[in-house]
């Protein structure tokens, strides 16, 4: 099995239902489908193209939902020779509990998913032993340091107090594992945490497979942010402004 043998994320989501029983895909707007498809299923040869995704939006625009959906896809559907351990880091215990509750609700709404996992108090475990999905407050993430993961997500990063958790979990080699960041206000101060190692676009031409979007802000604000961050393009999709700093833009 190779990475390309994994089902497309939209095919996987097409088999599922949202927590209220509606078909899941009916709840995912086109621009969100584009982002999920690009981050999770764009390839450079046989390797995933992106191993770093920074996805920011305004409030109440399904940031956390898409982070959990991406994590469930990598946890259940992705063919990974290294296993399917997945981590999501929240800014505090309350956010971690909310994220884990959403993952559990999605599993409860989909019996086929429920048959594949065991839902425990603080984590979700694949019955075949191929992986664990853990959602932790950032301050409790010490045990995840140095781990190999299929995806590592960071939720509500605008509230993080420092850069240490990114550096400890992302490491020097991102390999095939997406590092997925979700939060408000990301363009104003969050991209700067990269400190040159995780540049959205490397000044020296080095391509680290970075993908970045920001939806739900004013076009004027995006232009100002784009100028501050360097050479990027600004596009509009689905009546929302989208900041696009993916390689080749």
Image: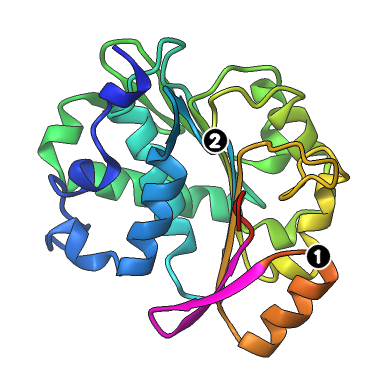
Distance Cα–Cα, label 1 vs label 2 = 22 Å
Left or right of residue 3: residue 49: right
Left or right of residue 164: residue 236: left
- Give the mark, 1 or 2, whose residue is nearer the N terminus: 2
The reply to whether residue 101 is in sight is: no
Q: Is residue 235 magenta?
A: yes
The reply to whether residue 70 is in sight is: yes
Residue located 84% across and 55% down the image: 192
Residue located 65% across and 27% down the image: 174
Q: Badge 2: few (under 14), some or many (20 or more) residues near its Cα, within 10 Å?
A: many
Q: Which mark is residue 229?
A: 1
Residue 102 lies, in percent from the top left, at: 36, 52
Of circles 1 and 2, which is in front? 1
Of residues 182 and 2, the one nearer the viewer is 2
What's drawn in magenta, residue-wise? 233-244
- Using the rendered view, name the quadrant where residue 80 is placed: top left
Q: Which mark is residue 172?
A: none
Residue 238 lies, in percent from the top left, at: 38, 79
Which residue is identified by label 2?
178
């Amino acid at each position: 099995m190779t990475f390309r043998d994994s089902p497309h994320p939209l095919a996987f989501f097409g088999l599922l239902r949202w927590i209220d029983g509606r078909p899941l895909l009916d709840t995912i707007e086109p621009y969100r489908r584009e982002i999920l498809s690009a981050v999770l299923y764009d390839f450079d040869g046989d390797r995933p193209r992106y191993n770093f995704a920074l996805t920011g939006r305004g409030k109440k625009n399904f940031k956390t939902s898409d982070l959990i959906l991406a994590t469930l896809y990598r946890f259940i559907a992705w063919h990974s020779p290294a296993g399917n351990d997945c981590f999501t880091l929240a800014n505090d215990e309350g956010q971690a509990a909310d994220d884990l509750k959403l993952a559990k609700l999605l599993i409860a709404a989909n019996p086929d998913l429920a048959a594949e996992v065991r839902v425990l108090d603080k984590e979700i475990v694949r019955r075949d032993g191929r992986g664990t999905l853990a959602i932790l407050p950032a301050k409790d993430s010490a045990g995840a340091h140095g781990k190999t993961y299929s995806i590592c997500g960071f939720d509500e990063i605008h509230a993080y107090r420092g850069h240490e958790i990114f550096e400890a979990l992302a490491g020097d080699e991102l390999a095939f594992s997406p590092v997925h960041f979700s939060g408000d206000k990301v363009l104003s101060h969050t991209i700067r945490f990269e400190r040159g190692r995780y540049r959205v676009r490397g000044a020296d031409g080095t391509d680290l497979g970075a993908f970045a979007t920001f939806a739900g802000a004013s076009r004027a604000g995006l232009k100002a942010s784009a100028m501050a961050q360097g050479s990027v393009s600004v596009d509009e999709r689905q009546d929302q402004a989208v900041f696009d700093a993916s390689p080749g833009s």
